[in-house]
Image: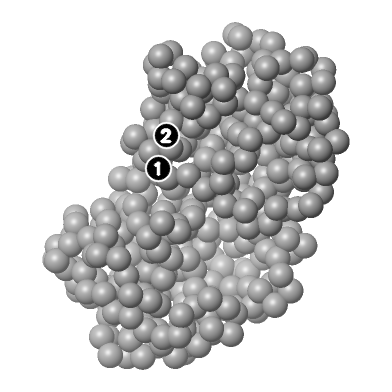
Amino acid sequence: MRIAVNTRLLLKGKMEGIGWFSYETLSRITQSHPEVEFIFIFDRKPSSDFIFSENVKAVVVHPQARHPFLWYLFFEFGVKRALDKYKPDLFLSPDGWLSLRSNIAQLAVIHDLNFEEHPEFIEPLVLRYYRWFFPRFAKKAKRVVTVSNYTKQDIVTRYGIDKNLIDVVYNGVNDRFLPLSEEGIRTVRKKYSKGDPYLLFVGLIHPRKNLKNQLRAFLKMKEETGSNLKYLIVGAKYSWEKELDELLESSIYGKDVIVLGRQGLNQLIELYGAAFALTYVSYFEGFGIPIVEAMKSGIPVITSNTSSMPEITGKSGLLVSPDSVDEIARAMKDLWQDTQLREQLVSSGIKRAEDYSWDKAAQGLFSSIQKALV
């Protein structure tokens, strides 16, 4: 059996959510199935870290897929030529992009349809590409995989895909995320927050992540409680708005917000484990990996009552409206003042996180591969 895979998002040191999904599932699937030959299709020379086993062959095709026009050329010409040459039994695309010109059976992993729900956060040219191609990708696919029941229903409703052709495969969480000891917490806090407890935000700094309202809520909570909480922001600055600087400069508590930028896995493990709580009040998520990383690390979660986030969190977090600064601030205040509530959410979250693992995700994805091959 031969399976070709779109691996363009395996980028050393630059992986975001879909890249990690690709890495964690493919590393397990390739090593667990030596009987299968895998053709990994990259758009640039790959790191040897991504050649997971002897049954993986790396192929580089052009052009590099960095822009809507280049996306089209990459998938409809570069990938198409590779599929014609290697003639796989299936083309797997972990980011949902397919080659519409190819007649090879294809399996698309569509993580979410955020561009349909919140087009205001997408650049006009990119939005046109997504809205034109993704309905066609969904219809082209022999099967579709997605990462939450919310997105499954979204695909059924918007694109008219038969629900029986869509498999839900939840994301996993790295096993290294664990609660820290009291001594470990003190050490990490001394390193990052001058010894003070802190709320944590992890994610790409983008308007869809709703950082503005979360910061407004933090400053409001500080004014009402006078707590010594800090607010640590971890993530690449995709879009840091001038309004955020003005917001922080306008408050005496603005100095308590610390922007750390992108951090490596070792630093993330520390930062989660020593945090007082995670605030992840995004407008829309197809899954929300930081929610599970936080629960597994033994810290409570404040997240949105929209899209997939209630499904992923269950009853193990505080759900608030992303539009309500008052609700977000009240949740922060409740955690600060109610020790019993915080301990209850920590215990419940650790148990909830057991539902998510990369081993389960890899098994689920390979099951979908087998269905698509029938």
Q: Is residue 358 visible?
A: yes
- The quadrant where residue 33 appears: bottom left
Q: Amino acid at mark 2?
A: Ile
Q: Secondary structure at mark 1?
A: helix
Please tell me whether residue 120 is drawn above or below residue 186 in the rendered image. below
Taking depth in this image into account, of 304 and 148 the one nearest to the observer is 304
Residue 38 location, x and y as percent?
Answer: 24, 71
Could you tell me residue 237's position as x and y percent?
62, 53
Q: Mark 2 and mark 1: span between their CA atoms?
A: 6 Å
Would you call the spot at circle 1 few (<14 residues within 10 Å), some (14-19), or many (20 or more)? few
Asked if residue 287 is positioned above or below residue 15 in the image, the reply reads above
Is residue 353 shown above or below 235?
above
Say what secondary structure mark 2 lies in: helix
How dense is the environment of label 2, judged by Cα within 10 Å: few (below 14), some, or many (20 and up)? many
Q: Is residue 43 left or right of residue 321?
A: left
Which residue does the numbered mark 2 point to in the structure image? 269
Where residue 291 appears, as percent x and y from the top left, is: 54, 37
Residue marked by disc 1: 265
Between 264 and 337, the residue placed more toward the observer is: 264
Quadrant for the C terminus, please. bottom left
Percent position (x, y) of residue 339?
61, 9
Residue 296 seen in the current view: no
